[in-house]
Amino acid sequence: MSDQNELHFLEGLRTAIESEDRALVREGQLPPERELMERYSVGRRTVRAALDALQAEGLVFRRQGQGTFIRPTSPVSTRAVSLSQHTSPAEIMEVRRELEPALAKLSAMRATPSDIDQMKRLVEKGASAKTSMQYERWDSAFHAKIADSVHNSLFHSLFELIQTVRVAQKWTGLRARTYSEALRDELIEQHFEIAKAISDRDPEAAEAAMRAHLRSVTLTTGT
């Protein structure tokens, strides 16, 4: 399946969740993986990658043996929509540079094998991105997965606030103007380094890799 079709499938699920499409969202739950495969004519790997991304973004959560459920909209997300109108990209990056290295360090100590597998899949998806929009989706999901893997609800809420502000139009527009395949490759290599440090259970290396990555993002975006 092409990367474009995979992204189209992901966007379709996201739209259905956000619009509460009753043809797909039933009593707060998505259909089983097999039903999604048959409905959209996609493979299991495509379905799982999309669910990984949606879970990392905080739109869904999974329960072992029960399925995939829609996460209720939190007060944090509602507040962030308003906050995004008064927050600059430079302010976003200042907070990210303080918070995310700490999250990467904790992730190296706490992430489960499943968390790490999901991180690696999200990095691979980002590496295949053809456009700025595609890259942003997988990049956001990767960083969100690291926050999720810390397994601390307050940290997750803080990250969710930043993430919601981050996807505001002025931020994505800034990233679109600076996007190139060469830059994508550079940032993806940094993602691989972060994921490897977490997988190696090396907290200091994970923290340093994330700090270096965010420094690169700051330099390339001028924030």
Image: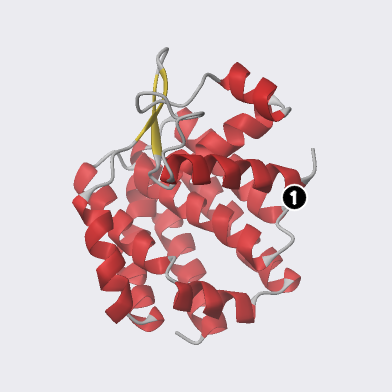
Image quarter of the N terminus: top right
In the image, farthest residue toward the top: 65
- Observer-nearest of 106 and 24: 24
In the image, farthest residue toward the right: 2
Image coordinates for residue 33, horizontal then vertical, percent? 57, 21
Image quarter of the C terminus: bottom left
In this view of the protein, can residue 202 be seen by the observer? no
Mark 1 highlights which residue? 4
Image coordinates for residue 191, horizontal then vertical, percent? 57, 56
Q: Is residue 1 above or below residue 78?
A: above
Q: Amino acid at mark 1?
A: Gln
Task: State the image quarter where residue 60 is shown.
Answer: top left
Few, some or many C-alpha atoms within 10 Å of disc 1 (few <14, some 14-19, many ≥20)?
some
Q: Secondary structure at mark 1?
A: helix
Image coordinates for residue 74, horizontal then vertical, percent? 24, 48
Q: Residue at x 41, y 24 (%)?
A: 26
